Structures are given as structure tokens and as C-alpha cells.
Image: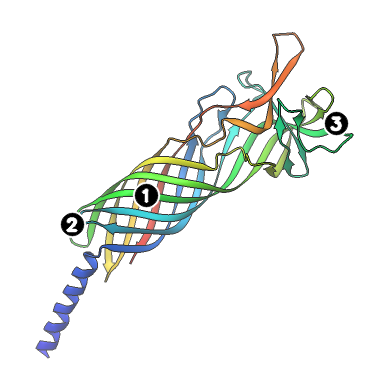
Amino acid sequence: MKKLLSLALISGVSFGSMAQDKKFQIGLVTGTTINWTKVQTTKIEKNGFGNDFIIGIGGNYMFNENVGLAMGLQFDMGNFTLNYGNDASTDLGEVYYAYEDTDILQYKSDDGGVQDLAAGDTTALAFQLLERTYKTKYITIPVFLKFQTSMLGKFRYYGKFGARMSILGSVRMDDLGRESTYWVTSQSFTTNAPTVQKTMTDLKPVGLKKELSPFKMGIGVYGGAEWNFTGNTFLYMEAGFNYGVIPQLFPQSGNMADKVETSAGSGTFTYSNLDIKNNPQHMVEVKLGLLF
């Protein structure tokens, strides 16, 4: 009996050591982010903070006991809001688009204005945009170098440095603004009722440009801890900051027109595709996961 107990104890310790020394681990992860757009133009304003819900898989491949590679595949579902007009301030201009049902039509200032209108149309439904909430879905691939301590009892601690790369899956928009009219002959926009606001929901842009860049990336620094609570299974929690290095929005819109008065008080206007330049997204991310 004593021999059996000794053998079981030795086997358990050996198995635990093997689990803790595994080179490859994979498991499930979930989490959330707080994100904000680093606005670097006078054409838009940040409106509060956005957030994402995260779910996916994550894993580690360790080169040795303390250094390895942390990767994963995540689905990020979130939202954020920007101001394109502001009645309380003259800092922002007037931004318009034409639409049909839930489709935001393409606009090309150097090629006939609003695109895809039916032959013979003299006007089109339009909207003066004040505030837009982007509802996004991204596929994210984080790739980080991981630096971890040896086991300290049931725990080990780590830091990570690397890149968080995201591919845009889909986007829908909820817009606040005013009903307007697009005049085909003059290629101009006018607001129908300047004092009346309304909300448009679940809009989608027509064309390849979806207002958001198809790819975004941030450089991130994270810290976390893993708890070996049973066998070769670890529960971990981590938090980090990602500094956006690629514009989150297209620098030049493919659907929105920027209305600019040629000179103060002249009453004449020019229209061009809205140009917002480089505006990356920064975020703080918190994740909880299991590794096997």
C-alpha cells in the first residue's frame, strides 16, 4: 500500500512538472476593450469612448521556460462614436451624403458627384450628418513576445510586447442628423429643416470603401498572471495598452461630401470628398482565459 501511494505521489508530481514545462498551450479567451480615436483633424471630433466584446482562442509556444510567443484568433464586436457636425460649435463643418433605403451611395467630387442614381433623377434623398456610431466586427490576430517567470507556487507572472492586427469583417452605422436633398444638376446639398433632427439606423456604405480601413494595427504592452489550478490547466488574466499605428478610418471618405463656403458670407459653396487624414485608434484591453 505504501509503495502504491509513493508511486501515485511521484507520478502526480512528474505529471504536474510536465504540464508546467509544456512548450505549447492553447485555450479559450474572452474579454473587453475601451477604445478611443486619436483625432488629428478639425473635420471630426471624438465622442466619448467605445468598447469591444472579445471571444476567441489564444495560445503560447515557449522557446524555453521564460521566453516564448503568444498568439491567437479573436472576434471583436464593438462600437465607437464620432461627431461630424456640432450645432453648439462652429469648429466642425457641414457633411452630407445621399442614400437609398439603408445604402449610403458613393460620392466622387471629381466624377459627377453622387454615383449610381437612376437616369433622369433630378434630386436624391440626402442626410446632413452630425453624429455617427460605428458598429464593427473585426477578426483579430495578436502576435506577442512573452516573457514569464518560473512557477512561484501555483502562479507565474508575465509581460508581453507585440502587435495586435485586426481585419475588418463588417460595419454598420447609426447616424444622427437632418434630412436633406441632393440636387443632381448643381451637384449640391441643402438641409430641408435645419431645426429638426432624426436618427438613421443600420446604414451601410456602397462601394469598396466602408469608411473604416480594412486593416488596423496597434503596438501593445501587456502584463498578466497565470494560475495552475489543476493538472495542466491554467487560468489567466491580463491587461494591456495598444497604441494605434495605422489609421482606423479611411483618410478620404468615399461616400461623404464636405460643404465649404468659398469665402465668409459669400453664399457660394464647394463640395469635395471629406478628408480627415490620419486618425488611429488606441485601446485598453482586459482578457480572461484558459490554457490547456
Query: Which mark lies nearer to you, 2 or 3?
Result: 3
Which residue type does callout 1 highlight?
Val
User: Closer to the N terminus: mark 1 or mark 2?
Assistant: 1
User: Where 262 sits versus 249, above or below?
Assistant: above
Please name the residue that numbered disc 1 is placed on: 143
Please name the residue that numbered disc 2 is placed on: 150
Instruction: Report the Cα–Cα distance between label 1 and label 2.
Output: 22 Å
State the SS at label 1.
strand
Residue 123, numbered circle? 3
Which residue type does callout 2 highlight?
Ser
Tag 1–tag 2 contact (CB < 8 Å): no
Which residue type does callout 3 highlight?
Thr
Image coordinates of residue 292 in percent, x first then y, are 33, 67
Image coordinates of residue 119 in percent, x first then y, are 87, 36
User: Where 228 sits versus 208, above or below?
Assistant: below
Instruction: Report the Cα–Cα distance between label 2 and label 3.
Output: 70 Å
Q: Give neighbour class at mark 2: few <14, some 14-19, many 20+ (Cα, 10 Å).
A: few
Q: Is residue 280 left or right of residue 161?
A: right
